[in-house]
Structure formats: structure tokens, C-alpha cells
Amino acid sequence: MRVLFTAYPERTHFLLMAPLAWALRTAGHEVRFASQPKFTGEITQAGLTAVPVGRDRDLWQLLARDPSWLGQSDKGGMPLPYDVADRPAEEITWEYLSQGYAAQVERWHKTSNVPMIGDLVEFARHWQPDLVLWEPLTYAGALAAQAVGAAHARLLFGIDMYGVAREHFLRLAAERPAGERTDPMADWLGGYARKYGGEFGEELITGQATVDLVPQCLQRRAGGLTYLPLRYVPYGGPATVPAWLRRPPKRPRVALTLGLSTTGHGGEYAVGVQDVLDALGDLDIEVVATLAEAEQRKLKRIPDNTTVASFLPLDALAATCDAVIHHAGFGTLATTALRGLPQLTLPWDNDGPALAEGVTRVGAGLRLNPKEATGADVRDAVLRLLSDPGLSRGAAGLRGAMLAQPTPNAMVPTLERFVAERRERAAAATVSGG
């Protein structure tokens, strides 16, 4: 079958999608990956066939001018209205959701999708994919799939804040008079659906299914949606393992890594790196810190027990470590979890706090607020990570949950059946309609 992947140009998201694209390709299926033209190099560097669509315009360009563009709370976490995934149902109001959706359609979703929609639909009509797998906010993928009658699914690699928020929205909409059920998402997507010969349906927002990389013990799922669990496979792009990393450490090794996205787009780390390194400097451990070069230049000193690198393949580094300190980005968190390591999370942005809460809930690590934590707080937490057998057991349990999910290779037959079932359903509907 022909499988079309699509995402807006966000490297960390693409890296999480690539292993499934490889699995489908090596199983004999034709695979294409569509994104904006500037992202072509990232796709082809991973050995995948790129389809440049639309024009180069994305959310980061707006955030560079106005960091508050998404309406994120000054306490961090998920942007409105998707932060309702962190709230009890009784605290969620119709006004907050409807106004939040209206804001994000204009600020976020149009920015990420409108530049791609027309070209993506055109390519889908030319290539006729059987299956479209789309990053959970690349609604252009759902529109293209509907335009050609292809099966389609979201590929989820974080908290399903979008599905949970939509579930609350539909619940509250049902309680309102018919004339007061404003729906910014349906109005926007429905207009494009009709343009290409279709009509609005909830699957344009939440897919016909959701392929989910997050183990259920960490995830927050929406009722009524079909989730297909998938094991995370570490992939960080081109990398070289240095000779020193192949030698066993003589002391407990702790990795410090604070992510690619923030500094890659001109931002700064939420925690004071110098303070953390200084606080860990007198411990009988080895610290390996992967820091962006711009952040390295801010350092006034590097303790004797610390090695600083611009980039190391995290899976290779984690294999030599006893614990990891990180920002709770899903790729970093999942790579650490697959190695069965206790982790200290310093979450701030997006779904990092929710994922970090899950890690602490299952006993696999500790969590600190990076805006409040001192180097001494990090030091105390690291000492506990290295000495508390309960955290080691919790980390082993989280590793087991990760390994229990089907590999990308095992997911291929599931997706083949999913496409076949959608075809059969469509054929039966055609017959009954005729």
C-alpha cells in the first residue's frame, strides 16, 4: 500500500515519526513524507523520500516575535485551551474552551496548516495514498486523506491534550441550545473539507484512529477514540559515538540534557545550568552535559567531574548512565525509560509537566520546577536517584510498560488491517447507498 506521512517542520516530531516510516518501507510499502520545502533536508537525511508542499511558514517564526502568541500560562505547561487536560471536568467551562479554540485556530492551527493544505491535497490526488499518518496538529493530513478517500490516523507522541480537550468540548456543546454551539474547529476545517468535496467530521480533528507512542501509564486518553499503542524507538538523527563513550565509566554517570527544540529556535533553558553544574561538582560522580553551543558560551566554569558536549546520541549516552536529568520532552523521557533509568525531570513547556507527573506517579523518578529549583535541590534529587531502590524499581516498571507496546515492525500488520477494514466499510456503504 501507499503510505503518506505528514507533519509541519518540527524536527523533534519528525524524529519520533521516522521509525514507523522505516518499518512500513522495509515491509514493502511505498512511503512518502510531506512537509514544507525547508524541511526536505531533514527528511531525506533520514533516508526517506520527501515531498515538499506549500510554502515555508511556521509557528516558530511567530513565537520568535511574540513568545506569548499561544496564550500559555506564566506557570508553563500546555497552551490554552488544551491545558484542560490537566483539570477536573467540573472546572472546565464552555466559554474557556470555545474562546480558546477560536484563538488557536487563528494563532496556531492556521499558521501550521494553511501553507500546506492546497499542495498536500494536490499531491494526494496525484499519488493516491491508501493511508495517511499525520502529526496530531497537522490537520492538513486529515483533509488530504478525506479528499482521496484514504484511511488516516494521528501519530501521537505526547499527552493527548487535543483529544481530551475535544472530548470536553463535545460534552459541553451537547448541553447548550443548538443555536449556541459555536465550533471554531468545525467551521475552519469544514470549509476546507467542502472545498475538496467532503464535509466536516470529528475524524478531521482526532483521526479515524490514533497511533500512540506514550505508554498508557503516562498517557491521558479521550473516551470513544481508538488508540493503537506503538513502542518508541530512539532516533536522534545522524550521530557518532565517540571513543570515550564506549569505555565504562569509573564512577556513577549522570547525564544532563535539556532538549533540542527550545535552543534550536532561539530560546533559553528554563533552569540555571551553571548553578546545577556547580552543585553537582563536588559529588563523586561523572556528569555528562549535552548543551547547545550558545548555552555553553554562558558558562563561567566547568567542574572537574563534568564533560560538556554539544550533542551526543542520547541512547548511546543513556546506556552508560545511572540516572538522567532532563526537561521532560517525550523523546528524552522515553529514551531514558527504555534504559530503565531513574530520572529527574525539570519540566516547563507544553506537556512536559504532565509527562513528568506521570513519571513521578509510577515511581520512576523525581520532578522539580525549573523556575524555582536551585542547584542544591538538583543535587539532593540526584543523590536520591542514585541511592533509592524504590526509584530503581519504578524505573524498571516503566521500562516494562514501554517494552510491552508493539514495535514499529509489529505495528505494520495492524495498519494493514486498519486500511483493509476502512476499505471494506467504504465499499459496504457504497453498496447500501446504491
Image: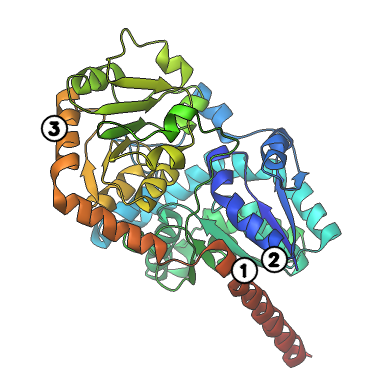
Q: Which residue is mark 1?
A: 412
Total marks drawn?
Answer: 3
Rendering coords of residue 219 (x, y %): 36, 59
Q: Which residue is mark 2?
A: 27
**Which dot marks residue 14?**
none
Question: In the displayed structure, would residue 411 be above or below residue 353?
Answer: below
Tag 2: amino acid: Ala
The crowd level at tag 3 (other Cα within 10 Å; few <14, some 14-19, many 20+) is few
The extreme right residue here reads 126
Q: Residue at x 65, y 81 (%)?
A: 421
Q: Which SS class for mark 1? A: helix
Q: Which SS class for mark 3? A: helix
Q: Residue at x 22, y 41 (%)?
A: 367
Q: Quadrant of residue 124?
A: bottom right
Question: In the displayed structure, would residue 10 be above or below residue 390?
Answer: above
- Marks 1/3: CA–CA distance: 44 Å
- Marks 2/3: CA–CA distance: 48 Å
Question: In the displayed structure, would residue 202 be above or below residue 360?
Answer: below
258 or 225, nearer to the observer: 258
**Which dot marks residue 380?**
3
The crowd level at tag 1 (other Cα within 10 Å; few <14, some 14-19, many 20+) is many
| Mark before the other along the chain sequence, 2 or 1 | 2
Q: Which SS class for mark 2? A: loop
Tag 1: amino acid: Val
